[in-house]
Image (cartoon, grey):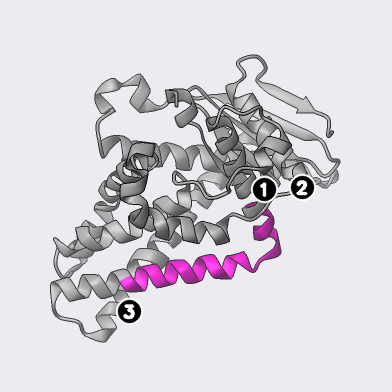
């Protein structure tokens, strides 16, 4: 498999899919009128521009930050295209939109740290666990439980289920491309929807890796100890990125199959079988991501 084929990634957005190649990312969205609109943006990773940063673990932390940035940009674009705007509303200024976007991202990150890293600490403290190893094990179990409950709860939401279907379309389209097949709905439909490089698997690996890393830090006794744990999150993300990167290679697939099983199992919830219309959107995003011609395309619905 070529470097480009193995470097394709993506994300489900509101009524659409974002696909990313080494040189561009493209977001395709199905509008309420039934058209597919595509926004294609040139993007070259920092680790490709500055080769000295392309080292294990460090590149994972950088990729995580870049993925968050691209993901938010794509979600913002999809929200603006997927919802019919009220003509009576005045458009927001670019400065106002940027400030609102920055505030939303900051709030989401703060809520994520609170829910998945601080709350488990509080629960473990309430149990009065003294041993450092046992404290971090219990803390990790709480973290995993909260995360799994979160996924199950949001999967009950009708709008989120549609995003999970687009998530499935993203994976099936990438599999078709990686297999060298023609990018059609028929070929994509035959592909599996559980992908080892999925963000869901990455998050599970982050949760499990954090248990082992935090064990070396012992039981947090002060505010400084807790802040140190938060500071370790980019490092944990870097290790997790490297693991996902290795586990997606065929020669390691059989050896690491038990380790990637939890992430693949959870993908049975976070990806759902897509419709052909959704596969068309995912294919349009991937083709635009690889196409070096137009920056913004408007494709009529088939």
Observer-side mark, 2 or 1, equals: 1
Taking the image as shown, residue 198 lies to the left or right of residue 141, namely: right
| Residue 152 at x, y percent in the picture | 55, 69
What residue is disc 1 on?
14
In the picture of the structure, the residue carrying the numbered disc 2 is: 83
Counting from the top left corner in percent of width and height, residue 120 is at: 33, 72
Residue 24 in percent (x, y) is at 53, 24
Q: Which residue is mark 3?
A: 123
Residue 119 appears in the rendering: no
SS class, disc 3: helix
Q: Are marks 2 and 1 in contact (CB under 8 Å)?
A: yes
Q: Reply above or below: 227 against 86.
A: below
Question: Residue 225 or 271: which is nearer the viewer?
Answer: 271
Q: Mark 2 falls on what kind of element? A: loop
Q: Please tell me which of labels 2 and 3 falls first in the chain.
A: 2
Mark 1 burial class by Cα count in 10 Å: few <14, some 14-19, many 20+: many
- Seen from the viewer's position, the closer of residues 131 and 110 is 131
Distance of mark 2 from mark 3, alpha carbons? 40 Å
**Label 2 – label 1 distance at C-alpha:** 9 Å
The answer to if 160 sits in the magenta stretch is yes
User: Of label 2 and label 1, which has the lower sequence position?
Assistant: 1
Q: Are marks 3 and 1 in contact (CB under 8 Å)?
A: no
Q: Residue at 74% across / 32% down in the picture?
A: 37
Q: Residue at x 37, y 26 (%)?
A: 46
The prevailing secondary structure element of the residues shown in magenta is helix
Task: Point out the stretch of residues depicted in magenta.
Answer: 141-163
In the image: residue 103, left or right of residue 161: left
């Amino acid at each position: 498999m070529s470097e480009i084929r193995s470097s394709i990634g993506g994300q489900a957005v509101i009524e659409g899919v974002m696909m990313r190649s080494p040189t561009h990312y493209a977001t395709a969205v199905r509008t309420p009128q039934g058209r597919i609109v595509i926004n294609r943006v040139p993007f070259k990773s920092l680790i490709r521009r500055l080769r000295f940063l392309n080292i294990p673990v460090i590149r994972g932390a950088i990729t995580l930050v870049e993925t968050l940035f691209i993901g938010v940009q794509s979600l913002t674009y999809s929200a603006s295209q997927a919802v019919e705007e009220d003509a009576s509303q005045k458009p927001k200024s670019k400065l106002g939109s940027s400030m609102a976007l920055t505030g939303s991202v900051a709030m989401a990150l703060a809520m994520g740290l609170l829910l998945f890293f601080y709350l488990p600490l509080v629960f473990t403290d309430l149990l009065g666990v003294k041993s450092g190893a046992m404290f971090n094990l219990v803390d990790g179990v709480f973290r995993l439980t909260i995360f799994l409950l979160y996924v199950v709860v949001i999967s009950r939401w009708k709008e989120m289920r549609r995003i999970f279907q687009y998530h499935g379309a993203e994976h099936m389209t990438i599999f078709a491309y990686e297999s060298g097949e023609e990018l059609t709905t028929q070929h994509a439909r035959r592909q599996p929807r559980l992908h080892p490089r999925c963000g869901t698997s990455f998050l599970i690996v982050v949760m499990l890796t954090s248990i082992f890393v935090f064990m070396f830090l012992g039981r947090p006794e002060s505010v400084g100890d807790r802040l140190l744990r938060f500071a370790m999150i980019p490092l944990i993300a870097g290790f997790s990125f490297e693991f996902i990167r290795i586990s997606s290679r065929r020669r390691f697939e059989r050896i690491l199959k038990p380790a990637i099983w939890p992430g693949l199992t959870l993908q049975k919830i976070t990806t759902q079988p897509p419709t052909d219309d959704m596969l068309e959107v995912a294919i349009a995003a991937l083709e635009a991501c690889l196409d070096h011609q137009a920056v913004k395309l408007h494709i009529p619905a088939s």
